Amino acid sequence: MKAILVISISLYSFIVLGHHSVAEYDRSVVRELEGEIVTLHWRNPHVRFSLRIENSDGVEEIWNLEAQSVNGQDRRGVPRDLMQVGDTILVAGNPSTRQKNHMFMTNILLSTGLEIITQEAGDARWSENTIGSTLVEQRNDATKEAQGIFRVWMRRMPPGLFPRNLPLTEAAKEARASWDPITDDGIMRCVAPGMPFAMLGRGPHPIDFTEQNGDIIIRAEYFDIVRVVHMGETGDVAEQPLSELGYSVGHWENDDLVVRTSRIDWPFFDRTGVPQSQSSEILERFSLSNEEGTELAYTITVNDPETFTEPVTAIWTWQWHPELEIEPYECTN
């Protein structure tokens, strides 16, 4: 059982927010490994394998492999019992630049010839017999009616993007350069992210909106996050305590929900080491964007003068999925 291949591909021109340890794995390189599964842990924030291989010198190595979340694999129809300890598999993925023999998996080929695509919108590599590239219907509930934004939404792929060349201040550039994803990425230790990353996490994880005592509750499956949007707030926001998710105030502009969030005490803008100060303010707009009311346009603008020389904006679309429910994330370190 041997390591097979290393292939260079062109660098992405944008940062895609939210995959696990994004700064640790070199997405410009795809490596293939063939070996025996030694351990298999099926849990959030990501599925983990260890694989025993024989390298090109005939020496045995153990590789630690990661894939996207359990919830994501479930929603793409990947059964948890397809693989067992002792199985021989072929995997492809992006190697770590920080840890020896670590890789983020994108594809798995089983001995049966079935290929598992382990990330949403991924491509097949070896086989026409594949699973995992698209969402599967979990249940058919056509009786659910549309009620404005108060439904379950799933982000359309590909996700929204901030520009790769963020307009960073000199202080932010220095902070980013010193960031270590191994020691500084709390998500790897199941620390739930604050804003804005709480709304940016990658993977097929839905959100929903409900009303409660005149306010709006935004619930994200990712890390079981719950945000409260205070509607019609007239008090002094500056008197509110700092918190990871900040203090959100909302209002309606026709059918659009507009949310302004400040008082954020979360040190990072993203998972590539871009810092965030307590001066950060976030403006979000949720807009039904088609006549059928099945798409929700999301615009997020972050203004943090200590980090950015100008505000940064990303836009993407969520789709209504009446068959989905918010499932527990239950991250386990």
Image: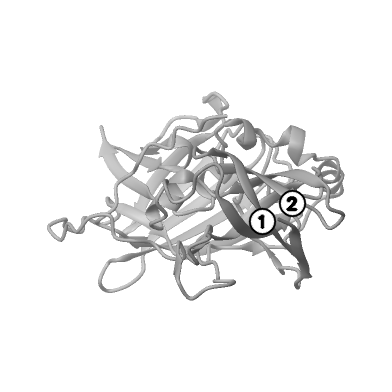
Residue drawn at (42%, 43%), measured in percent from left and top?
A: 220
Q: Report the disc number at residue 24.
A: none
> Which image quarter is the C terminus in?
top right
Q: Amino acid at mark 2?
A: Phe
**Rendered-image quadrant of the N terminus:** bottom right
Residue 214, by quadrant, is top left
Q: Secondary structure at mark 2?
A: loop
Q: Residue at x 53, y 34 (%)?
A: 246
Residue that mark 1 sits on: 311
How far apart, in angstroms, are the residues tagged by discs 2 and 1? 7 Å
Residue at 80 percent of width and 54 percent of height: 55
Horizontal placement of 115 versus 71: left or right? right
Q: Quadrant of residue 12?
A: bottom right
Q: Few, some or many C-alpha atoms within 10 Å of disc 2 (few <14, some 14-19, many ≥20)?
A: many
Classed neighbour count for the residue bearing mark 1: other residues with Cα under 10 Å, few (<14), some (14–19), many (≥20): some
Q: Residue 215 in the image: x percent, y percent?
A: 32, 37
Tell me if residue 205 can be seen: no
- Please tell me whether residue 282 is drawn above or below residue 115 in the rendered image: above
Circle 2/circle 1 CB separation < 8 Å: yes
* Furthest-left residue in this view: 143
Tag of residue 308: 2
Q: Amino acid at mark 1?
A: Pro
User: Where does the image place residue 4, in percent across and percent down from the top left?
Assistant: 74, 63
Residue 73: x and y in percent read 45, 52
| Residue 297 as seen in the image, left or right of residue 149 | right
Q: Quadrant of residue 135?
A: bottom left
Tell me what residue is drawn at x 50 percent, y 44 percent.
Answer: 84
Q: How is the structure coloured here?
A: one colour
127, 14: nearer the viewer: 127
Query: In screen coordinates, is 250 left or right of 47?
Result: left
Q: Secondary structure at mark 1?
A: loop
